[in-house]
Image (cartoon, rainbow, N blue to C red):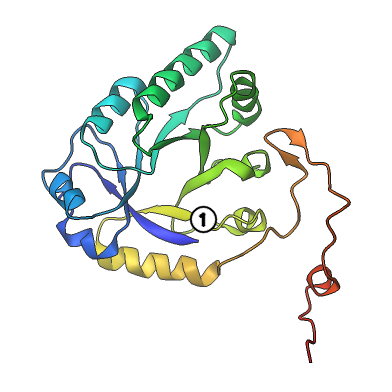
Amino acid sequence: MRFVPLLPSSIDPEPWLSLAPLMLQWDGTLGAGWAPAVRKGLAIHALHLPGVTPVEEGLEVLRHGLGLDFLVLPVSRPKNREAGFRLLGRLETLLEATSGRGTKLALRLEDGAEATVLDLLREAHGEAIGFCWHPGIRDAEPLADRLWCGVCEPATDLCPLQALGYRWDMALAAERPEVFLVQAAALEAAHPPVLFPAKMPATALGRPVVPDESVVFGSHLVSGEPRDRS
């Protein structure tokens, strides 16, 4: 996986440009240097919302035209059906706002909210919405096929996530470029890249995975040993 700096949206991006792509944590304002940097080709992979007023925050962020891949918003477990409908209404508004922009929604779920939110999205045919992994998620397997981005800390153990085959971008909050480089290097050394899951998932979006008996792996893949091709 690739480790990406996660920066407050209000700061000057200049010291960080050589470390692009970058991720932003929305703190209510956008530093003056971000828009010009984006026009010059800076890639901002994701922007994380605080989630106090997610629709208003999201619409304000989208107004700046940052070319985001993902707009990430925190989501708590809906306590009742009415709260679930309110959540779906917010997501529908943001989906409409991101339509045609190339930006996808990723939910940063409160631990324990996975099953409830997955059920809501399934009922609403919300397949266009993905998820952002974070250390508070203890069981990521139900989300594994729609984990689009993640956020971690310097001491986070990412081995369980690697076992699911995750190999995309991982945000790491950073204060200075030199500190970020040291922390990212340590994480990369501890978690080398993976190509495939350690084992096939038992579920996908809460549904059991039914193996396809017509798919047969070569013996060199099943055993994990390289095959002699001489």
Residue 131 position (above or below residue 219)? above
Q: Residue at x 39, y 22 (%)?
A: 96
* Vertical placement of residue 201 versus 128, above or below: below
Name the residue at 38% across, 44% down: 69
Q: Secondary structure at mark 1?
A: loop
The residue sitting at 13% across, 48% down in the picture is 36
Residue 186, above or below 58? below
Is 113 situated left or right of 73 in this image?
right
> Which residue is at a point 55% across and 66% down the rendered structure image?
191
Q: Dividing the image into 4 quarters, which one contains the C terminus?
A: bottom right
Q: Nearer the viewer, residue 27 or 54?
A: 54
**Total of numbered circles in the picture?**
1
How far across and down, in percent of the image, does residue 155 sit? 48, 58
Q: Which residue is mark 1?
A: 156
- From the viewer's side, name the closer residue of 190 and 92: 92
Amino acid type indicated by mark 1: Thr
Question: What is the residue that sits farthest to the left in this orientation?
Answer: 32
Q: Quadrant of residue 95?
A: top left
Q: Residue furthest right?
A: 213
| Residue at the extreme top of the image, as rendered | 82
